[in-house]
Structures are given as C-alpha cells and as structure tokens.
Image (cartoon, rainbow, N blue to C red):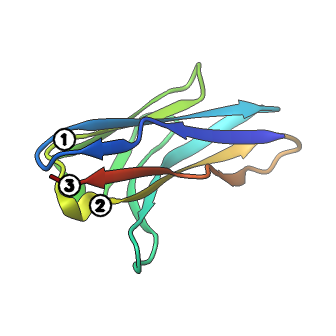
Amino acid sequence: QVQLVESGGGLVQPGGSLRVSCVASGSILSVNGMGWYRQAPGKQRELVASVSRSGTTNYADLVKGRFTISRDNAKNTVHLQMNSLNPEDTAVYYCYAYIRDSGFDFNNYWGRGTQVTVSS
C-alpha cells in the first residue's frame, strides 16, 4: 500500500511565504514524476508545478518566479516553496506521484491535500 501525505499548509498573510511538503511511503520500488496541483473553491484543479526524477521542473505561468519545487529521491519527498503569496493562491494543494509499487507500471497516486489560505 502506497500513501502520500502532505504537510505544511496553513494561514499566511499576503506577501508571505509557506512551504508544503509531501512524503510517499509504503511498498515503493521506484518514483518517477512528482508534483503539486491545487484546487480553489468553485474552480477546477490545476497543475502548479512538477519535477521529474532527474530534477527537470515545470511551473504554471501564475507561479513562475514565486514558487520553487524540489525533491529528495532518497526520502521520496517533494517540497513546494511558495513566496510572495497572494489571495489568489488560496486553495487546497494536492501532491501527486507516479510510483512503481509492483510489476513494471507506474501508477498515479494522490495525497489528500493540505489547505493554504492567504489572507490578512
């Protein structure tokens, strides 16, 4: 059984910073791509950032220059450092990962999400 657990969400003032993290655990043979989506109330879930196993990163235009994604392959973790936050960043942030837990295929796993609220 594979689990992804996020941490680090919370309330922050506009212009502030927050770091969310996600750790994958369980019967893991290999982890490929990892990343973060977010979903604000009344909106569709959208990709925030992703990082390949080799470290190649990709960001949504709205967060480029403000957010930084990183990962630790030895610990099966992915982090999202968020700076210069604004109220439009308020959302539930979901971690995902492509994990090979048996056989040859990589399966897509999701965390339960962590709330990030940007408000004064």
Kindly report which numbered mark, 2 or 3, lies closer to the viewer in this rendering.
Answer: 3
Could you tell me the amino acid type at mark 2? Ala
Label disc, if present, on residue 83 of the rendered structure:
1
Identity of the residue furthest to the front in this view: 120
Could you tell me the amino acid type at mark 3? Ser
Could you tell me the amino acid type at mark 1? Asn
Kindly report which numbered mark, 2 or 1, lies closer to the viewer in this rendering.
Answer: 1
Residue 47, position as x, y percentages in the image: 41, 62
* Quadrant in the rendering for residue 59: bottom left
Residue 42, position as x, y percentages in the image: 41, 80
Identity of the residue furthest to the right in this view: 103
Residue 66, position as x, y percentages in the image: 18, 46
Label disc, if present, on residue 119 of the rendered structure:
3
Q: Earlier in the sequence, mark 1 or mark 3?
A: 1
Judged from the image, the secondary structure of the residue bearing numbered disc 3 is loop
Q: Is residue 61 visible?
A: no
How many numbered tags mark residues here?
A: 3
Kindly report which numbered mark, 1 or 3, lies closer to the viewer in this rendering.
Answer: 3
For the N terminus, the image quarter is top right
Q: Name the residue under label 2.
A: 60
